[in-house]
């Protein structure tokens, strides 16, 4: 519900309808907040639902441009934060790094040099997503005026593709005499892991 409200709001905003877009967004937040509030009351936890309803109410009081900007920042931060958490939490002691898990799904048993590389690569992806979270703020501070908005609206996706390409080259250079997986095999392993 929140996702649909957010997408609808940004479509309306792109059509130059900023005020209706913001109202669409906060109405979606209010509806989602009410559903969450009802669900949390049934479980005895009302805090999340109350927070979402209060945020929606605040959204009605704020200027439409601010509401849409806040939505973009929150969605971007949640996405990058979730990806950071996905990789970084597997680096804790006693856990198998995410890239190592995926490599095992594709290749089975792994050589020691591959185990080391996949651990380092999990660190690299963690640091990459941490940098991605900070990128809009950095661009806002030192970049041209307004360019930080481009980061929020998809300019960071090419950086992910560059990371994939650079990593593929580094992997082939560092790990020799090994049957390297294709990008599609890696994506399938990730999807299989996500379904568990």
Image: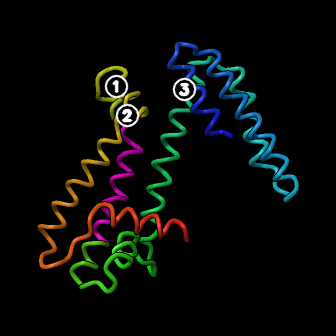
Cα–Cα gap, marks 2 and 1:
7 Å
Up-down relation of residue 77 to residue 28 (above or below): below
Q: Residue at x 81, y 55 (%)?
A: 45
For label 2, the crowd category at 10 Å Cα-Cα, with few meaning under 14, some 14 to 19 and many 20 or more, is: many
Label 3 element class: helix
User: CB under 8 Å between callouts 2 and 1?
Assistant: yes
Disc nearest the viewer among 2 and 3: 3
Where residue 19 sits in the image (x, y, percent)?
A: 63, 15
Please name which of the two marks, 3 or 1, marks the residue nearer to the observer. 3
The residue tagged 1 is 147
Identify whether 184 is placed above or below 29. Answer: below
Q: CA distance from mark 3 to mark 1?
A: 18 Å
Is residue 184 left or right of 35 when viewed as pictured? Answer: left
Residue 57 located within the stretch drawn in magenta: no
Report crowding for label 3: few under 14, some 14 to 19, many 20 or more residues within 10 A (C-alpha).
Answer: many
Q: Are marks 2 and 3 in contact (CB under 8 Å)?
A: no
Q: Is residue 121 magenta?
A: yes
Q: Considering depth in this image, is 174 or 70 the residue closer to the camera?
A: 174
Q: In the displayed structure, would residue 153 be above or below residue 90?
A: above
Percent x, y of residue 20:
65, 17
Could you say whether the residue bearing mark 2 is in a helix, strand or loop?
A: helix
- Going by the image, does 89 lie left or right of 115? right
Whether residues under marks 3 and 1 lie with C-beta atoms below 8 angstroms apart, the answer is no
Marks 2 and 3, the one that precedes in the sequence? 3
| Residue at x-position 30% and y-position 41% | 158
Residue under the point 44% across and 73% down: 92
Task: Say left or right for 26 vs 65.
Answer: right
**Residue 133 location, quadrant:** top left
Residue tagged by mark 3?
Answer: 10
Would you name the residue on which mark 2 appears?
A: 151
* Secondary structure category for the residue under label 1: loop
Q: Which residues are magenta?
A: 119-136
């Amino acid at each position: 519900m929140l996702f649909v409200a957010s997408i609808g709001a940004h479509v309306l905003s792109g059509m130059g309808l900023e005020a209706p877009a913001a109202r669409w967004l906060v109405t979606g937040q209010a509806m989602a907040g009410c559903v969450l509030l009802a669900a949390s009351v049934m479980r005895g936890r009302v805090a999340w639902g109350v927070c979402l309803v209060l945020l929606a109410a605040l959204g009605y009081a704020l200027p439409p441009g601010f509401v849409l900007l806040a939505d973009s920042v929150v969605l971007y931060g949640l996405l990058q934060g979730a990806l950071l958490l996905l990789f970084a939490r597997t680096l804790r002691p006693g856990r198998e790094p995410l890239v190592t898990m995926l490599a095992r799904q594709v290749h089975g048993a792994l050589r020691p040099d591959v185990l080391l590389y996949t651990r380092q690569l999990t660190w690299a992806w963690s640091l990459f997503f941490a940098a991605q979270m900070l990128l809009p703020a950095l661009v806002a501070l030192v970049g041209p005026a307004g360019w930080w908005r481009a980061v929020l609206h998809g300019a960071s996706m090419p950086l992910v593709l560059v990371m994939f390409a650079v990593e593929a080259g580094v992997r082939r250079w560092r790990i020799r005499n090994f049957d390297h997986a294709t990008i599609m095999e890696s994506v399938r392993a990730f999807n299989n892991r996500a379904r568990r």
